[in-house]
Image (cartoon, rainbow, N blue to C red):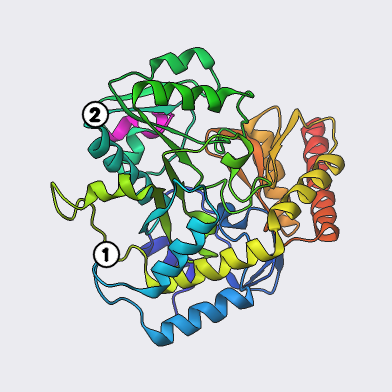
Amino acid sequence: MISNRELFLRHVAQTSTAPLMLEIQEAKGVYLFGKSGKKYLDMISGISVSSLGHGHPEIVEAVKHQAEKFMHLMVYGEYAQYPQSELAHLLSENLPASLNSCYFVNSGAEATEGAMKLAKKVTGRSEIIYCKSSYHGSSQGALSIMGDEYFKQNFRPLLPDCKMIEYGNSSDIEKISKKTACIFIEPVQAESGVTVPPEEYLQSIRKKCDETGALLVFDEIQTGMGRTGTLFAFEQSGVVPDILLLAKALGGGMPIGTFIASKNLMDNFTDNPVLGHITTFGGHPVSCAAAKASLKVILREKLWENALRLEALFKKELKHQKIVSFRSKGALMAIEFESEKFNRDVISKCIESGLITDWFLFAPHCLRLAPPLIMDLETAKKASQIILQAIEETALNEKTA
């Protein structure tokens, strides 16, 4: 009989020469359970997706209930499906008044694509500005505004009129002009290793967009849904975007994304041409039901407050001479080491010790921490001890090598 590992390597498309190859049989709460019964503490939440942990009973019940009622009925926007309508209403109730119209898609990359089209349609312009070390997805439009040439070079030509600026550099804001359709920016840049912009930076971008007529797009695909200490990271800046992108944690483990704007802006998709943006499975009823259940739990339990408690604990506990810096915004955290090799060795030792962590796309020398927001402080302290032990063992091995 062919093993699962063999089938995986033989028939599932590979994106790396060294996949983790963990065979997970079950996931519950903040833990994953391997084929041999080994328990792993999940410290990255499937890259900020499983903010309520795994198998949350309210999400599971919502999925079961909706699956029994109906699943796919019709392509997007034709039927008034209550799972979509109720989720859109709940999101709108918890956002500024100008963000009151949701277009549901299947992923963060699709939210990026839709927002790019909307900005071009609204402004009649083609130039899109993005930031160095930004990540907005891997489809060709999203790839065009990825802030790292290494991941783009073999897929050109990409979209024209895309211009890169340096994140946090106030002088680069002047590059936003009356030719600019929009600027895509993360309120906290994730894949650079958790980079928080200077105070007033986002306000200055908002001002420049208002002066030039460019739209401001906030990508909160990784930072939204309570991860950074507020329900949405942009709330901490006092700046409201024209378009907001959400995905990852939005679905509570189910695939869903959305781009949100004012109804006035979003109505640009209704004519010239009609069906200005189309998706078959976007806003799938089961995913919307899961997202609504997840959001209700986050709101009821104010899980953004626990994100801050987790941040404070890890900031206090993770002290070691090998740690170059500790950067964080709520429960999105990066431990910086002196080299990529040292970081990868620490990650390997963590996984061996039953703790799952990872690196950042544009900061491979930084260790990622993005635990489920339901994690208690006792478990978080245990996690910090495992990480410190892994750092110490790696440092000792380095000395004796």
The percent coordinates of residue 72 (x first, y second) are 31, 76
Tell me the amino acid under the disc marked 2: Arg
The quadrant of the picture occupied by the C terminus is: top right
Q: In this picture, is 315 found above or below 269? A: above
Comparing 104 with 398, the one in front is: 104
The percent coordinates of residue 391 (x first, y second) are 79, 41
The quadrant of the picture occupied by the N terminus is: bottom left
The answer to whether residue 154 is magenta is yes
Q: In this picture, is 118 found above or below 85? A: above
Side of 6 where 236 appears, left or right: right
> What count of labels does the image hold?
2
Side of 326 where 176 appears, left or right: left
Tell me the amino acid under the disc marked 1: Gly
> Which mark is on residue 87?
none
Rendering quarter of residue 213: top left
Residue sitting at x 46%, y 63%:
89
Q: Earlier in the sequence, mark 1 or mark 2?
A: 1
The answer to whether residue 228 is magenta is no
Magenta highlight: main SS: helix
Few, some or many C-alpha atoms within 10 Å of disc 2 (few <14, some 14-19, many ≥20)?
some
Rendering quarter of residue 54: bottom right
Q: Tag 2, which secondary structure?
A: loop
The percent coordinates of residue 221 (x first, y second) are 49, 48
Comparing 338 with 134, the one in front is: 134
Asked if the residues shown at circle 1 and circle 2 are in contact, with their CB atoms under 8 angstroms apart, the answer is: no
Which span of residues is magenta-colored?
146-155
The percent coordinates of residue 123 (x first, y second) are 26, 32
Residue sitting at x 34%, y 73%:
81
Q: Which residue is the site of mark 1?
A: 77
Q: Which residue is the site of mark 2?
A: 125
Q: Is residue 23 visible?
A: no
Q: Tag 1, which secondary structure?
A: loop
